[in-house]
Image: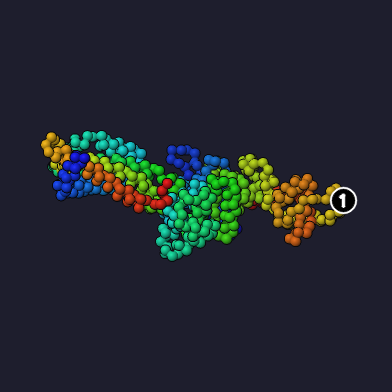
Amino acid sequence: MDGLQSWWSYVVGHSDDVFEATLEHAQITVTVVILATVFSVALGIYVQSRPTSKAIALAISGIFLTIPALALFALFIPLVGPGNSPAMMALFLYAILPILRNTVTGLDEVSPAVVESARGMGMSPAQQLWRVRLPLAWPLIMTGVRISTLLTVGIAAIAILVGGGGLGVFIQGGLTRLGLPNSVESVWVGTVFTVVLGLALDAVLSLIQRLTSSRGLRA
Amino acid sequence: MAVEPKIRLDHVSKVYPGTDTPAVSELTLDIDPGEILVLVGPSGCGKSTTLRLINRMIEPTGGRIYLDGDDVTDVNPDQLRRRIGYVIQQIGLFPHQTIAENVATVPKMLKWEKKKISARVDELLDMVGLDPRVYGGRYPKELSGGQAQRVGVARALGADPSIMLMDEPFGAIDPITRESLQNEFLRLQDELRKTIVFVTHDIDEAIKMGDRIAILGKQSVVHQADTPERILAYPVDDFVRSFIGAGTAMKGLAFERVGDLDLAPFDGPNGNGESGAEPTGTITADATLYEALEEMLRTADGKTIVLDDSGEPAGVVELSHLSDALRTAQDEARRHYDELEAAS
């Protein structure tokens, strides 16, 4: 109980900093996820009907995920200097795979009979995409977006190591002062608020997913 | 003879890249306005391919396609398809749209006014026997197979196309529902008089639905294209004979009604009695000869009393009537084909 109390008094004592860091963390995440969504959905639409490109795109975005975060973050420093930028670039690459894969799978799963009837009624390829295929793939695409968001929130905590901000500041700050007063509290503030932010963003996306998916697609 | 065909296929071919043998080879076929032409043949004969060549879901590699005399072989296929209703076995309703939205698909693409669209949707759903107030707001997953195909038909009729292409539309539906859908569709067609090309592999469905039947062999070669009566009475070759199968002569009996026959007189319940027992079975004048035969077999009398509208005996139909009717149909068909041959 002592730990919880001192943690809480640390939060209260640094409420402005905590709020600011959470906001920055959220900004990084939301920006990255929006860009990754636009990119990955467009790429997914393009590669879905091209088996070779599809395999290559999925393989490469899979490889991105296996590159250690620290290395990938640092790789961008020579290009754009330290700060949030290299972090966001790295996070963007991480966020691609879940959205790309779910876009491709979602489009793959549209029943051929549905596409056949859309075509048979005289829908152009663009109309088939916007009116039929994308709306049908949408729930799965949104699931991918939610996974990418959780992934991004978590990994964004190490942006501090390349000179960025966000809740990682509390974690890193605590770790470098370990043993000194309030160091553990600081680590826990960074951790807990990262988790809470992740859950909050996921809840919002879940609501958006529900509101933007057709009632006819619910199980 | 002067009627311009609604659809004319003129030496239409389809050769898929990488193959030598065409899927459809030089097919020439005229489809008259307002008729149901059934394409029937064994699986793999190219009947579905042929159907899909008409709305250019598959692009022909040779020949020309005419609708109402206009060459549509090279027009924009999307524009073309909006003029042609298309119904497929797997139905393909849009699962994310309500029934009303599904039915409104083509009118919406043609940018009809909202009011006109919603009136049309209600009309169409009524037409196929679904209450628009009950079903309009539902989603496809809430429908049975039979209901879904009713919606499929309503959707294809959306912008009132004069042509409908139907690819085994009732093939995946249970036999009882299929029968009622077939009957309702024929009743609907009596009012609508669409030009319909209907694909099936089931000869009985072809006989039932078709004003004319085209029996297709490999590569969509037309072995015989004629009314069901003539095909049953006079299959032109062994392929047709084996495809229509056994008992075909008897199927032909379903096309004639007892009331059209020259019946034998009815001598009363205790007539002269010299020809043995009086018939005990009865049928009405609007029964088919097939039903008369069934009644004869059931009662083992070899003849059956025909009742008029008031339920009084109007005469007697005998086995010889049936064999005469079959012979007449065969003679008529043979004469028809002899004339065709003489003319060519």
Residue sitting at x 42%, y 59%: B108
User: Where is residue B272 drawn, in percent x and y?
Assistant: 88, 53
Which residue sits furthest front?
A1
Residue sitting at x 36%, y 47%: A139
User: Where is residue B115 drawn, in percent x and y?
Assistant: 43, 65
Q: Amino acid at mark 1?
A: Gly
B195 shown above or below A106? below
Host chain of mark 1 = B
Number of callouts in the render?
1
Front-most of residues B266 and A193: A193
- Tell me, what colour scheme is on the image? rainbow
Sort mark 1 into few (<14), some (14-19) or many (20+) by Cα contacts within 10 Å.
few
Residue sitting at x 27%, y 47%: A200
Q: Is residue B14 left or right of residue A157?
A: right
Front-most of residues A159 and B321: A159
User: Where is residue B326 drawn, in percent x and y?
Assistant: 72, 48
Tell me, yes or no, if residue B135 can be seen here.
Answer: yes
Residue sitting at x 50%, y 42%: B23
Tell me, yes or no, if residue A93 can be seen here.
Answer: no
Mark 1 lies on residue: B273
> Which image quarter is the N terminus of chain A in?
top left
B36 shown above or below A107? below
User: Where is residue B184 drawn, in percent x and y?
Assistant: 58, 55
Q: Is residue B16 left or right of residue B240?
A: left
Q: Secondary structure at mark 1?
A: loop
